[in-house]
């Protein structure tokens, strides 16, 4: 197909998700030069200031260790690396202002010992955040730090960062890299789940990250030496860019099987009919996304309309599955990040991370596993930002 025809085929979806019609730009620098400095491979026993770098990361991104500030790039790395980070801030690199998170690498054994020490000091709980499409390490670190502030999570925060391109028109490249990273992520999750000192793993994924998380959990369920995988108990899928029917099929055998649910496994989905990014993804893939309650079946939509109900279609009910419809409280230009932007969604998310199963603010629907959130017109933007803890200076009102 000619480039002009391909661009035309992308249509309206191009503006949001993009059609990748060019190869990844390898750049003018050999990748070996990025990692030549010894800081790219931490020495065993190297001291890391845990107070200055409070959060943990695992990444398959290629690092650039040539300048004073280490940067994680959009290229695939030569191996998985471990380290510590803090929320990004403005720094000057080569006379240019950059928004980068401070970070330091750790040798894997040192990283695991530090994670255990932090987990032991807390409640044995770990929160693992997996990002989605169009993210850099800086933007993901910003979101992970916000989640830590907003939830007040009493345990270590781990960011898993795969090589998203961080670009609007690289959706297909991101999908490719996400699938390429499946083995890396599932092996890491298996190792984490097998640690006897990890009492509970709370997994939070956004967008495309759900397609890493669900197959990895199923793999750990099958392969882990911990036969019950019971510490993977609280899985949160925010705006999941996941084929709805594939999800329903894939959770049946292991992820939400009767014995997993009996061991307290549950999945919470945040979905919005106003999510423009997932509408674009549906246009590209041809089928509804899990995070967007679009009625693919026109007869089902007609039946809902005839009953005087909103034309919103959700995954089938299943024990352990809860759907929170954020359509009416969606914020932002795309409605794709409500758990980070919308006060009603943020409040609900905070409670779900804390392990709460119900909230009085949830409004029941005709489906027992689906609840919707209502907007509060009195809330100002500043109040949304404060409740969601958009910045470190924002207030504590939740």
Image (cartoon, rainbow, N blue to C red):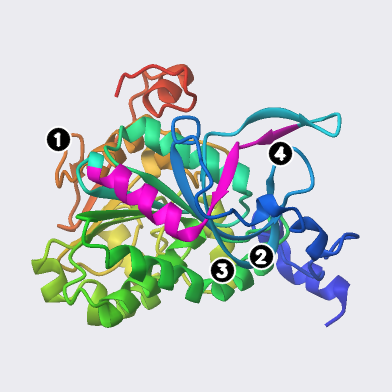
Count neighbours of disc 1 (C-alpha within 10 A) and say few if under 14, some if 14 to 19, many if 20 or more.
few
- The vertical placement of 182 against 388, above or below, is below
Q: Secondary structure at mark 4?
A: loop
Decide: is 217 above or below 391. Answer: below
| Disc on res. 360 | 1
Residue at point 79%, 73% (across, down): 6
Badge 2 element: strand
Q: Which residue is mark 3?
A: 178
Q: Quadrant of residue 234?
A: bottom left
Q: Nearer the viewer, mark 3 or mark 4?
A: 4
Residue 158, position as x, y percentages in the image: 42, 49
Mark 1 or 2, nearer chain start? 2
Q: CA distance from mark 3 to mark 2?
A: 13 Å
Question: Which numbered dot is residue 69?
Answer: 4
Q: Is residue 342 above or below residue 110?
A: above
- Furthest-left residue in this view: 262
Looking at the image, is mark 4 or mark 2 earlier in the sequence?
Answer: 4
Q: Quadrant of residue 25?
A: bottom right
Q: Residues within 10 Å of mark 4 (few under 14, many from 20)?
A: some
Q: CA distance from mark 4 to mark 2?
A: 18 Å
Answer yes or no: do the residues labelled 4 and 1 have beta carbons within 8 Å?
no
- Residue 342 located left or right of residue 173: left
Residue 317: where, in percent of width, then height? Answer: 20, 67
Q: Nearer the viewer, residue 41 or 306?
A: 41
User: What residue is rendered at 60% in x and 36% in y?
Assistant: 102
Query: Which quadrant of the figure contains the N terminus?
Result: bottom right
Q: Which residues are magenta?
A: 98-120
Q: Between tags 1 and 2, which lies in front?
A: 2
Residue 32 sits above or below residue 114 on the image: below
Outermost residue, front direction? 45
């Amino acid at each position: 197909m000619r480039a002009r025809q391909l661009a035309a085929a992308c249509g309206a979806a191009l503006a949001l998700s993009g059609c990748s019609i060019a190869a990844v730009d390898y750049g003018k620098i050999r990748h070996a030069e990025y990692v030549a400095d010894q800081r790219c491979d931490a020495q065993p026993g190297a001291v890391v200031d845990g107070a200055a770098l409070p959060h943990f990361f695992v990444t398959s991104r290629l690092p650039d260790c040539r300048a004073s500030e280490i940067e994680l790039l959009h290229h695939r790395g030569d191996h998985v690396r471990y380290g510590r980070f803090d929320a990004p801030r403005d720094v000057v690199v080569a006379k240019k202002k950059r928004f980068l998170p401070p970070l330091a690498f750790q040798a894997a054994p040192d990283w695991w010992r530090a994670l255990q020490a932090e987990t032991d000091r807390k409640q044995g709980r770990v929160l693992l955040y997996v990002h989605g499409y169009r993210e850099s390490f800086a933007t993901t670190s910003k979101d992970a730090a916000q989640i830590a502030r907003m939830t007040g999570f009493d345990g270590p925060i781990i960011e898993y960062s795969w090589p998203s391109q961080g670009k609007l028109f690289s959706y297909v490249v991101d999908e490719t890299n996400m699938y390429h990273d499946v083995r890396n992520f599932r092996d890491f999750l298996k190792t984490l789940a097998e640690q006897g000192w990890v009492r509970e793993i709370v997994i939070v994924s956004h967008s495309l990250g759900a397609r890493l998380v669900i197959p990895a959990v199923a793999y750990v369920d099958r392969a882990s030496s911990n036969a019950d995988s019971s510490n993977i108990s609280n899985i949160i899928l925010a705006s999941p860019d996941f084929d709805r029917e594939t999800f329903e099929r894939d959770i049946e055998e292991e992820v939400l099987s009767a014995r997993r649910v009996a061991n307290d496994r549950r999945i919470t989905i945040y979905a919005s009919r106003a999510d423009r990014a997932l509408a674009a993804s549906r246009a590209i893939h041809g089928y509804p996304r899990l995070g967007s309650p679009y009625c693919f079946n026109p007869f089902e939509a007609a039946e809902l309309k005839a009953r005087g109900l909103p034309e919103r279609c959700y995954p089938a009910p299943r024990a352990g599955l809860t759907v929170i419809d954020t359509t009416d409280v969606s914020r932002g230009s795309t409605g794709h990040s409500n758990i980070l932007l919308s006060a009603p969604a943020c409040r609900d998310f905070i409670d779900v991370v804390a392990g709460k199963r119900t909230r009085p603010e949830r409004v029941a629907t005709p489906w027992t596993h689906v609840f919707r959130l209502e907007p509060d017109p009195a809330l100002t933007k500043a109040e949304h930002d404060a409740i969601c803890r958009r910045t470190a200076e924002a207030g504590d009102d939740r």
